[in-house]
Image: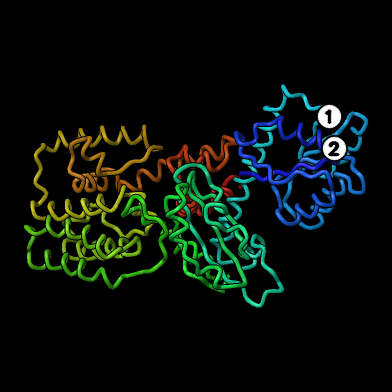
Amino acid sequence: MYKVMIVDDESWAIRGIRNAFDWDKYGFEIVGQFTSAYKAWDAIRAKEPDLVFTDIRMPDISGLDLMKRAKAHGMNIEFVIVSGYAEFEYAQEAMRYGALDYFLKPLDVDMADQFIEKLAMHFSRRSAARNHLLLDALTSADQDEIKRFLPLSDCAAVCYYQVLTIYFEDENKDFRKLLSLEGRPVYAVEVEAGTRKMLVVLMTEHRACLEGNWDELVLNKTGINVVGISSISSQLKHMSKLIKEADLSASQVFLEEAAGAVHYEPKLHLVKPCIDGLYSIIQENQFDNMGVYIKGLQEYFRDHHLGMCEVVYLWNQAVGILVNAYSEELKDMELEFLNYSEIKERFEHFESMCSFLHDVLASIRQENSRSLQEGDILSCFNRMIAYIDRHFEQKLYLKDLSAQFFINQVYCCQLFKKNLGKTFSEYVSELRIKKARELLKQTGLSIEKIAIKSGYVDYYYFNKVFKKHCGMTPTKFRKS
């Protein structure tokens, strides 16, 4: 919600502004109403609203004075000037000083919806631009760049940092209320990273403020699905690492639908029995046990409360073991080392990943026996490719496509490499990034909307994939 304050020395004018607009509908919340400009200025400094409606002429402090003071203090606040006909020249002067807009008293109620919708669109675009700049800065290795976007105090002897990744059940993203941050000596900088995902950088001089029990807070708030919680660091250079830790922790939803509050706590040593089990199946040719092994994997991860760190470790160790043992048989399969984002993009959930490993083992045991003739399989594969070409902007999983077009998913991996020279994931990514490049060049759509139209609901992940393919972020690509 965008925070709004209304300032006018006449209370009837405040009531008129408050009642003229459907604030909630357009994402605004009134956090203060003042007939005294002095009190308004104190509140503006304390709460830093996003938008201030102010009368142009008031006793002692004018609306123009409020604008000048906010600008002198470096506040990123927008102002809408409320003006009478006799004061129109003042309104024009305010516009020259950077006022977002103005309206004349009395407000034409028939124009109210159009006026506030215009304001909402402005804030949406401003928020999108800020998000991309923040993401680029926080994930860079340039500490000076990070400092530009974080309100660091030069007076503090030390500052502690922690990052939260929050997934919301709906579009209510007022995390300050949901996490009870209000009233704490903690400064928070939020970055929208998806339609229902937010990164929050917490900063404080008091480490104890970041060591509270988030679990109870999250469990009591139905607006939050999961919160990934990073470790705490006093080093600004660790910011990118903290973001990754929070994102990894929030990825617990890959293993369980409602994860609650998840602290970053790697338990890689607990994965060793799982790796040993796979190694035994291959070395001792115990493929008849693979069904029990795969089922046991899911139970083991659940019983030991393992998370995304352990999923990534298991996958990459399994890939290493399988490719080393069956390099020739598996050369065309989509068996490659993946990070956590790539695993979530490729598999719907942990069960799907385990199912794929089962199919790989079954393929090895059966030596790729197939029920369809080669010509029939290729025909099915071509229909699958045509389907992907038409639906790449949707969520696609190889397991579902293989079932839909009657091809074993392991053999499907081989067909991609054999016929297209690339993996399924590479093929889909190329289609999506090509679409994104076209939209960035040819439209004025926000980067968030372009990400969604290209098949990515997670802007943070879209940013990384685009940079990997194009060597620069979407923001920089558009500017170039």
Label 2: state its secondary structure.
Answer: loop
Q: Does residue 319 sit above or below 65 in this rendering?
A: below
Amino acid carrying label 1: it is Lys
Q: Name which residue type carries label 2.
A: Glu
| Numbered marks: total | 2
Q: Which residue shows up at 22% across the image and 51% down it?
A: 356
For residue 312, which quarter of the picture? Answer: bottom left
356 sits to left or right of 288: right
The residue lying furthest to the bottom in this view is: 157
Element marked by disc 1? loop
Q: Residue at x 26, y 45 (%)?
A: 416
Q: Which residue is mark 2?
A: 10
Residue 428, above or below 240:
above
Q: Residue at horizontal 36%, vertical 51%?
A: 258
Residue 270 is situated, as x and y percent measured from the top left of the image, at: 26, 70
Which mark sits nearer the N-terminus, 1 or 2?
2
Lateral position of residue 287 relative to residue 380, left or right: left
Q: Name the spot of residue 49 as percent of width and height, x first.
A: 70, 49
Looking at the image, what colour scheme do you see? rainbow
| Residue 29 image point, x, y percent | 65, 42
Q: Residues within 10 Å of mark 2 (few under 14, many from 20)?
A: few
Circle on res. 105: 1
Q: As drawn, which residue projects farthest toward the top? A: 110
Query: How much space separates mark 1 and mark 2, taking CA atoms?
Result: 12 Å
Quadrant into which the N terminus falls: top right
Number of residues whose C-alpha sits closer than 10 Å to that of mark 1, classed few (under 14), some (14–19) or many (20 or more): some
- Near-viewer residue (18 or 450): 18
Q: x and y percent of residue 190 in the render?
A: 58, 54
